[in-house]
Image: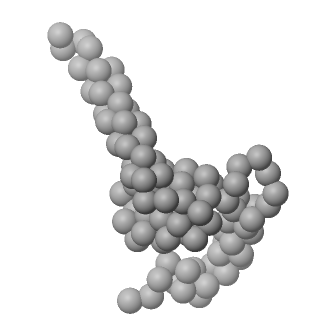
Amino acid sequence: MPTPGETFKKLDPELLKMVSETRKFAFETEGALSPKYRYLIAMAMDVGNGATHSVTGLAKQAIATGATKQEIAEAVRVAHYIKSASVLNVAGKALEDLL
């Protein structure tokens, strides 16, 4: 089974190039956040989005840039809180007229 990158290399190489440039901008430019924290943030976001394959890759990159297993676990805790809080917020709004 081809990867999404392989698929879009054939389907829309211009889009793939733009995504690649955006990735470099997000992870490889100099800035206030170290690469470790950039990867931890991205990993936590993908945890919340259910992107299992991406979570694995981003966790490995976080470790490669100095993250510990504890930092990964704590990033997952934050993702868990944010996701569960959004569930309560959506449900609260959706159900407020029923109560």
Name the residue: 75% across, 65% down.
28
Confirm whether residue 90 shows in the render. no
Name the residue: 42% across, 53% down.
70
Is the residue 29 above or below the residue 2 in the image?
Answer: above
Position of residue 60 measured from the top left corner of the image (x, y, whole percent):
50, 70
In the image: residue 27, left or right of residue 83: right
Name the residue: 55% across, 50% down.
41
Question: Front-most of 67 and 77?
Answer: 67
Please, which colouring scheme is shown? one colour
Question: Front-most of 47 and 18?
Answer: 47
Position of residue 55 measured from the top left corner of the image (x, y, whole percent):
43, 64
Position of residue 88 measured from the top left corner of the image (x, y, whole percent):
30, 27
For the N terminus, the quadrant is bottom left
Confirm whether residue 7 shows in the render. yes
Residue most toward the right?
30
Could you tell me how many numbered marks the image carries?
Answer: 0
Q: Quadrant of residue 8?
A: bottom right
In the image: residue 7, left or right of residue 56: right
Question: Front-most of 87 and 7?
Answer: 87
For the C terminus, the quadrant is top left
In the image: residue 34, left or right of residue 96: right
Is the residue 91 above or below the residue 25 in the image?
Answer: above
Question: Front-most of 46 and 38?
Answer: 38
Is the residue 34 above or below the residue 1 in the image?
Answer: above
Name the residue: 18% across, 14% down.
98
Q: Quadrant of residue 36?
A: bottom right
In the image: residue 52, left or right of residue 32: left
